[in-house]
Every structure is written in structure tokens, then in C-alpha cells.
Amino acid sequence: MPLLIIAFGVVLLLILIMGFKLNTFVSLIIVSFIVALLLGIPVKDVVHSIENGLGGTLGHIGLIFGLGAMLGRLIADAGGANRIATTLIDKFGEKRIQWAVLFASFIVGIALFLEVTIVLLVPIIFSIAKELKVSIVKLGLPMVTAALAAHAFLPPHPGPIAVAAEYHANVGLVLIYGIIVAIPTVIIAGILYPKLAQKIVPSAFTREGSSSFGIQKTFKLEETPGFGISVFTALFPVILMALGAAVDMVQPALGFKDNWFVIFIRFIGTSSTAMLLSVLLAIYTMGIRRKTPIKDLMDSCSSAVNALGMLLLIIGGGGALKQVLVDGGVGDYVAKIFEGTSMSPILFAWIVAALLRVCLGSGTVATLTTPGLVIPLMATMPDVNLELVTLATGAGSAIASHVNDAGFWMVKESLGMSLKEAFGTYTILSTVVAVSGLVFTLILGAFL
């Protein structure tokens, strides 16, 4: 019954949005109420569950999302994004620009949350798309592929870090193996699949992107900030968070205790602190240093956040639906389905994470829930490679992003796609990432 209820909820959501043309946020909340009641959540707890889901999702990403939007807009309005775009075009050439976007997104995505990576890079790829007169979707798909792969496979992202701890896997090895698995995965999903997607949903490749993220200004190249300072400003949060992650990885190995320096690095390396410091840096490098009035800089910050109001609500609505499914016991139902299995832990971890992802929506929740089901099986197989099980869990958690995933709505809205186009591009693309991740994890396992 829980799986049928989930299927009913998804169909109802599609009918409300596509059939009745209802606002996406309103549709998500309506479906959350109905699914909560059908799953047997007590009437008195339904509103609490929905509020927790919406608040928990926005509480997790709201601060870094807002600051990330400000950072991206400051760089864009100063012409920094235009400078980066122009330089990338010159270095890679028009024919290889997707490779440039994929490479840059993967580097940025290692240390940034999926949502922040998108917020930071959409203005830049918007500039590239505008310069080359191509659809933003053509460049957006490589970007989200790299960000999704980093989110699923690589520490210091919360999912891989947490699940590695649950399995007692070596985080350093997870990072190394994750990069090995991620490289061919992002090439297949980010470079090869979009060519097929253009035949499946050609209308998506006529999109120009969301006006919330678009850059309306035109610049003379000599009036824009330098390429080096523009890249440094954009990557500054990556540098800070990478420092924090490095301390977390190195400290246990070296065995030294916390001191003021370690505490300070950890503090500036947290995502919220790093984003705040990066916005302050951007105010200087993209504004004050170039004699831009502070009022104009604050107008840029305000417009960045104002434009994202409905997008934030839609993401929160996706979080509400996810929480209803969690509170409705869908995870426990999945656990019963696989009780007593003797399957390979690597494959089993992938299947469980994939099923939880499809049902619950949140890749992070799927990742964190899977070890509780997989660890009992691993106890009977002492020689299993824990790092590969960690990667398989992350791969499964990336599969089939759809309407109950906040990231789905973010990609759809930021790239300006319809629901049908988002299914034909991002939903299938995330599945390609998941399946390719499993395949390359199994291949890597044959050599380890």
C-alpha cells in the first residue's frame, strides 16, 4: 500500500500542475496533505509533519542558498561571470564548451552543496549560453551532472561523510575511489546523455533559463574584473570549505588535539560561514575595489534574493512531501521488503538507497537510512570493501530525481524547463549517474 500511495501522490501532483495549471508550490502542499492522511499519519500530526519538512529543508539550505544567490549576482552584475565565460570560451573553444562547464562544475561541486553549486554557476553558464547563442539547458546539464556526482560520491558532502562513518569506511579512500568512479560517470551523463536528450525532448534545448538567474547587463570586456580575481571570488567558498574538510580528514590521522587554529579553520570552513565571508569578499572585489557605490551592491543582493522567493517555496514544498513520506513509515516498509536477503552488500546497498530515494525524494535521507538495512548483511561478510559499499549507497541515492525531490524543482526552475522536459533531462540524467556509478564501482571492486 505505501508504494501505491506514493504512486497515487505523484500522479495527482502531475495532474494538478500539468492538467489544472495549479501553482507548483500549492500543488506540492495539497499532495502532501493527501498523502499524509492516506499513509495513516494522525490528523493532529499532519500539519506538524508538513511544517517540519518545509522548515527543515529551508533551514538546511536557506542561509547558504540566499548568500549563494547574492554571491552569484554580485559576480554577475560586476561582469565577473562575463569575464569567466569569455575566457572559458577562448580557452576551450565553442565545440568543447560543455567540457569546460563540466570541469569547472566538478571542481566547484566537490566542496559545495548541490544547491549552492547551481546558484553559483547558473549566472556563469547563462553568460556562456548568451555569448554562444545556445540553450542554457545544453550547458546546464553538464553542470548539474558534475554537481550531482560530487554530491553523491565525494566527501565533504554530508551524505558520503555520514554514510562512511556508519560503515566505518576510510573517508580518504572514499574520496579517492569516488573521484575515480565519478570521472567516467560525469562524462557519460554530462556529455554523452545530453546528445540523446536533445532527441528525446528537443523543446528543452530551446530554453533560455529562468529570469531569476539570468544576467540582463551587457559588458565591455575591458570594464569587467580580471579573470583571476573573478575565479578566486567565485571559488572562495570552495577554498574555505576545502580547508575545513582537510582538517577533518587529517586531524584523526595525525592524532593532534583541537586548538585555536583547528577550531578557527573549522569555523570558517562551515558552509554558512564560508558563504558569508565570500559575499563580503565579493562586495570588495566586485564592488568597492572597482569604485561601485555600496547602494548598487546592496541592490544587487536584494534583487538576487527577491527573485528567488517562489523558488524557495517550491523547494520547501518538495521537502514537505519528503517529510510526509518519512513520517508515514515508507522507510520501514522498504526495510521489510528486503529483510533476510543474502545479496552482495554493494548491490544491496545500491538497490536499497535507490528505492528509498525514489520513495522519499531526498538523496541525503536515502543515504542516511540505507546503512541501517545494509550493516546487518555486511556482518556476515567480513571481507567486503566498506569504501565501495559507501560509493554504491551514494550512487543509489542519486537515481530518478523527480517531483518529491527539492533538487528536481531547483534544476527545473533555474533552467526554465517544463515538467515534461525536466523528466526527459534531469530525471533520466540522475538515473544515468546512479547506474553508471554502480557499474564503475563494481568494476573498481574487481581490481581491489
Image: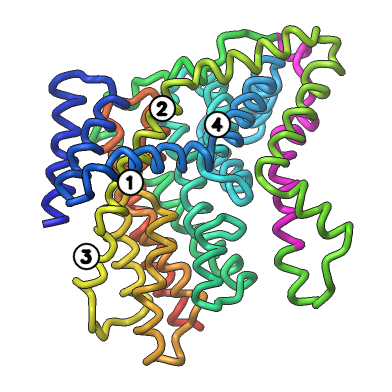
Mark 3, Cα crowd under 10 Å, few <14 / some 14-19 / many 20+, is few
Q: CA distance from mark 1 to mark 2?
A: 14 Å
Looking at the picture, does residue 186 appear above or below residue 275? below
Residue 137 vs residue 326: left or right?
right
Query: Is 246 colored magenta in this rendering?
Result: yes
Instruction: Give how far across and how far down residue 146 sits, in percent.
Output: 50, 47
Instruction: Give how far across and how far down residue 319 sits, in percent.
Output: 38, 41
Label 1 vs 3, first from the N-terminus: 1
Question: Are the residues tagged 1 and 4 within 8 Å (C-beta)?
Answer: no
Prevailing secondary structure of the magenta residues? helix
Q: Quadrant of residue 78?
A: top right
Q: Which amino acid, mark 1?
A: Lys
Label 3 vs 2, first from the N-terminus: 2
Question: Are the residues tagged 1 and 2 within 8 Å (C-beta)?
Answer: no
Q: Residue at x 38, y 76 (%)?
A: 346
Q: Residue at x 44, y 86 (%)?
A: 384
Reading the image, the residue beneath label 4 is: 119
